[in-house]
Amino acid sequence: LALKRIEINGFKSFADKTDIVLSPGLTVVVGPNGSGKSNVADAIRWVLGEQSPRSLRGAKMEDVIFAGSDRRKPVGMAEVSITLNNEKGLLPVDFREVTVTRRVFRSGDSDYLLNRSPCRLKDLQELFADTGLGREGISIIGQGKVDEVLSSRPEERRAIIEEAAGIVRYRNRKREAAKKLEETQQHITRLDDIIGELE
Ligand code: ATP
């Protein structure tokens, strides 16, 4: 599942539309301290559905929108798109190339797009489960993450192994099915009550 392209517009230090095209092989981003290298990784985590402003090094979600600089006015919207090569069909959709977009406005409105069509965060989470890009994705190893994995609780470590093993999608579906079963059981109990009253 190769990352082909990252488009960043109005996200953190990227006031202007920035297009990063990745060629096959290893890509290294270099630059002085504070020039925005980590912001590129933040952009990828954000477009993949990151919900915690703190893990994006901010206090609130609005902090991902370019806040202005000495020479530039703030902007009103942050938008990030990543394009993945899906030729091997690793993502369960009928597209050879998948572009995922996330936008947020200062008003708080936000949306997600899959190949430019609106979708829900849930659709993206489902799409990326078990690919290593899912929630708690293991494809992005942040600073200090290796230490964290080594010192994490067994349950947390298990979650990482489960994502790598590719069973997260099925566990999520099992949880949803169990919930439906529970609801159905409650309906049956209620129906039994009503039948009892009628008899
Ligand atoms: P280091 O090598 O020190 O880790 P880096 O190249 O990874 O640095 P980042 O942490 O990615 O740098 O970038 C930090 C810069 O991004 C800071 O200058 C900060 O002011 C800027 N920045 C972060 N959020 C915003 C925002 N919402 N608006 C404008 N600039 C922002």
Image: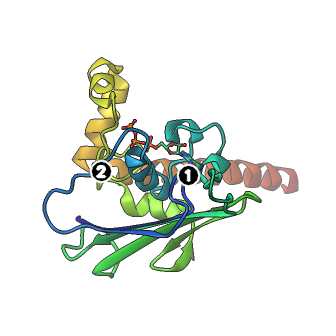
Q: Quadrant of the C terminus?
A: bottom right
Label 2 packing within 10 angstroms: few (<14), some (14-19), many (20+): some
Residue 176 relative to residue 192: left or right: left
Q: Mark 2 — residue? A: 132
- The residue shown at (15%, 56%) is 26
Q: Secondary structure at mark 2?
A: loop
Mark 1 vs mark 2, foreground winner is: 2
Find residue 92 and report its image quarter: bottom left
Residue 109 relative to residue 163: left or right: right
How far across and how far down the image is residue 171, in percent? 39, 47
Looking at the image, the residue that sits furthest to the right is 197
- The residue shown at (51%, 42%) is 56
How far across and how far down the image is residue 15, in percent? 55, 61
Tell how many labels.
Answer: 2
Residue 138 in the image: above or below residue 46: above
**Amino acid tagged 1:** Leu
Q: Looking at the image, which is closer to me, 48 or 54? A: 54
Q: Looking at the image, which is closer to me, 10 or 127? A: 10
Q: Secondary structure at mark 1?
A: helix
Looking at the image, what colour scheme do you see?
rainbow
Residue 30 relative to residue 176: left or right: left
**Amino acid tagged 2:** Gly
Find residue 78 and report its image quarter: bottom right
Residue 41 in the image: above or below residue 124: above
Q: Mark 1 — residue? A: 181
- The residue shown at (37%, 28%) is 156
How far across and how far down the image is residue 68, in percent? 65, 53
- The residue shown at (76%, 50%) is 190
Q: Looking at the image, which is closer to me, 109 or 35? A: 35
Looking at the image, the residue that sits furthest to the left is 25
